[in-house]
């Protein structure tokens, strides 16, 4: 088998890119199409005996998927290779997670591949992407302005979120070479009819855009490959430049923090690259963070005051006077309520994942200008306008309202949160502070005009969230 020029080319590509060795165990994600079936035949001969496994994912989207399964299982039975057929409910995942069909399918496949990798004790996940796939991906990213990920498909990539290393041995081949080779060898394969639906952007690029480019320049694929290599070198260089500032990042399970002054000292280009790197480092690679998101954070850093921005994956970016921080917004609403009790001096409680500190202060110990300083997470109010024996904290319920600072009429909490663009994932988990039945502070946002500090204030109640 390896005497054929196609097989020689694949073997040389594997060695050149150091994808894997013959001793490694490989799980091939096999669709039954010509690309993955060529790779199945190649790997069966290339790897040491018993080191190949197959998996086919039935997305539940096509009745003809049964034909794909038959092709995969026929190969597996003939060659004595283990093959797993795994159904995944892509439509349900897309509906419940509000994702595109394509992204929902990708997430479910990677989740199952991660499980199988450990269950089968394999070293690598192989996929049958070829050079035409590389070019399609390049133009897909280019059209959506994905400058931080501009490029094609990498021959080898590690996905830390899923603890997977994916290899693509066929990136050295064009689709036409594969389609010529398969009948020549008499290898069976199936065809996914959805690949010809030009209402799908990728298929339009494949069947309309790329053939037009090839008419103008028959060698454009080679040019794109060279550009892809250059972009990877560029990304590696930027990564090396950011190593030192990344060492200043403070991170735990729930948040990530970086000094704002150090970020502002960078060139604007590196600032944006660094923001993108921080988000990917904190949230993982499975979320699509676009140029729009990065620019919004960049503008907030350049500005003054406190700002919060919600990114994909329930990631909340907070920028205050000193720090850029990232945290995950709660994804589920869990009701909470706490009776604080009478405050004498200082009190600290743990509630809903935050520490709340209460302090009673005399106005002669702090200046009015100091009262107005600080972040929205620490406020001072008139202690004598509060019933200190009936303080309570809870999350919002339907009908909650208050008199926002500077206003004379009540406004519903719901309307306030919408107007202030409080991230939806945070609204039901934001602590509301009450004195009896009076809402005095929406934690982290706004106090009530009823408890504002005036020239007549003698005692202060300071409340801080940490």
Image: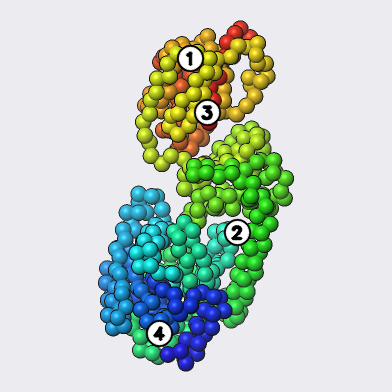
**The one of 426 and 354 positioned closer to us in this rendering:** 354
Q: Earlier in the sequence, mark 4 or mark 1?
A: 4
Q: Which residue is mark 1?
A: 343
Residue linked to disc 2: 147
In the image, farthest residue toward the bottom: 3
Q: Are marks 4 and 2 in contact (CB under 8 Å)?
A: no
**Marks 1 & 2, CB-CB < 8 Å contact:** no
N-terminal label among 1 and 2: 2
Q: Look at mark 3 in the image and give the residue it sits on.
A: 465
Q: Of callouts 4 and 2, which one flags the residue occurring earlier in the amino acid sequence? A: 4
How far apart are the two marked residues, 1 and 2, measured between alpha carbons?
54 Å
Of labels 4 and 2, the one closer to you: 4
Q: Quadrant of the N terminus?
A: bottom left
Q: Is residue 281 left or right of residue 181?
A: right
Taking the spot 65% from the left edge, 67% from the top edge, the residue there is 233
Compare marks 3 and 2 and give the one earlier in the sequence: 2
Question: At which x and y percent is residue 219?
Answer: 60, 80
Question: How far is mark 3 from mark 4, CA to CA?
Answer: 62 Å
Q: How far is disc 3 from disc 1 in space, using C-alphas?
A: 16 Å
Return the x and y of residue 3 as percentages of the image width and height.
47, 92
One can see residue 105 in this view: no
| Residue at screen point 64% across, 46% down | 248
Q: Earlier in the sequence, mark 3 or mark 4?
A: 4
Q: Circle 4 sits on which residue? A: 45
Asked if the residues shown at circle 4 and circle 1 are in contact, with their CB atoms under 8 angstroms apart, the answer is no
SS type, badge 1: loop
Residue lying at 52% horizontally and 85% vertically, measured from the top left: 9
The answer to whether mark 3 and mark 1 are in CB contact below 8 A is: no
CA gap, disc 4 and disc 2? 39 Å
**Label 4: element kind:** helix
- Are the residues tagged 3 and 2 within 8 Å (C-beta)? no
Q: Relative to 342, does residue 357 appear above or below in the rendering?
A: below
């Amino acid at each position: 088998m390896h005497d054929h020029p196609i097989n020689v080319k694949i073997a040389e590509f594997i060695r050149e890119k150091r994808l894997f060795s013959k001793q490694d165990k490989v799980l091939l994600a096999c669709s039954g199409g010509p690309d993955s079936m060529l790779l199945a035949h190649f790997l069966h001969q290339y790897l040491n005996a018993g080191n190949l496994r197959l998996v086919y994912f039935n997305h539940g989207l096509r009745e003809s998927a049964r034909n794909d399964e038959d092709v995969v299982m026929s190969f597996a039975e003939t060659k004595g290779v283990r093959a797993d057929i795994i159904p995944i409910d892509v439509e349900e995942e897309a509906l419940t997670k509000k994702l595109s069909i394509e992204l929902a399918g990708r997430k479910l496949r990677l989740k199952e591949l991660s499980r199988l990798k450990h269950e089968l004790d394999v070293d690598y996940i192989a996929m049958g992407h070829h050079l035409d796939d590389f070019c399609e991906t390049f133009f897909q990213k280019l059209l959506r302005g994905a400058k931080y990920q501009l490029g094609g498909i990498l021959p080898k990539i590690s996905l830390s979120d899923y603890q997977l290393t994916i290899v693509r041995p066929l990136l050295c081949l064009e689709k036409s070479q594969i389609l010529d080779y398969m009948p020549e060898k008499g290898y069976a394969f199936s065809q996914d009819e959805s690949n010809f639906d030009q209402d799908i952007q990728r298929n339009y690029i494949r069947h309309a855009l790329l053939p037009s480019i090839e008419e103008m320049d028959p060698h454009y694929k080679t040019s794109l490959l060279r550009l892809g290599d250059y972009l990877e070198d560029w990304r590696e260089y930027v990564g090396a430049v950011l190593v030192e500032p990344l060492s200043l990042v403070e991170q735990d399970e729930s948040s990530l923090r970086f000094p704002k002054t150090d970020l502002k000292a960078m060139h604007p280009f590196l600032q944006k690259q660094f923001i993108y790197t921080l988000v990917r480092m904190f949230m993982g690679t499975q979320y699509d963070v676009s140029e729009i998101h990065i620019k919004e954070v960049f503008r907030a850093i350049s500005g003054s005051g406190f700002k919060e921005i919600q990114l994909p994956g329930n990631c909340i970016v907070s920028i205050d006077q000193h720090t850029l921080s990232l945290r995950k917004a709660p994804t589920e609403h869990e009701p909470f309520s706490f009776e604080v009790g009478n405050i004498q001096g200082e009190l600290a409680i743990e509630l809903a994942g935050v520490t709340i500190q209460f302090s009673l202060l005399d106005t002669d110990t702090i200046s009015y200008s100091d009262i107005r300083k600080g972040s929205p997470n620490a406020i001072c109010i008139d202690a004598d306008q509060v019933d200190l024996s009936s303080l309570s904290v809870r999350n919002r319920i339907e009908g909650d309202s208050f008199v926002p600072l500077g206003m004379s009429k009540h406004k519903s909490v719901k309307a306030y949160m919408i107007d202030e663009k409080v991230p939806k994932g945070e609204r039901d988990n934001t602590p509301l502070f009450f004195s009896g039945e009076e809402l005095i502070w929406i934690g982290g946002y706004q106090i009530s005009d009823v408890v504002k500090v005036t020239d007549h204030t003698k005692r202060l109640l300071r409340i801080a969230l940490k």
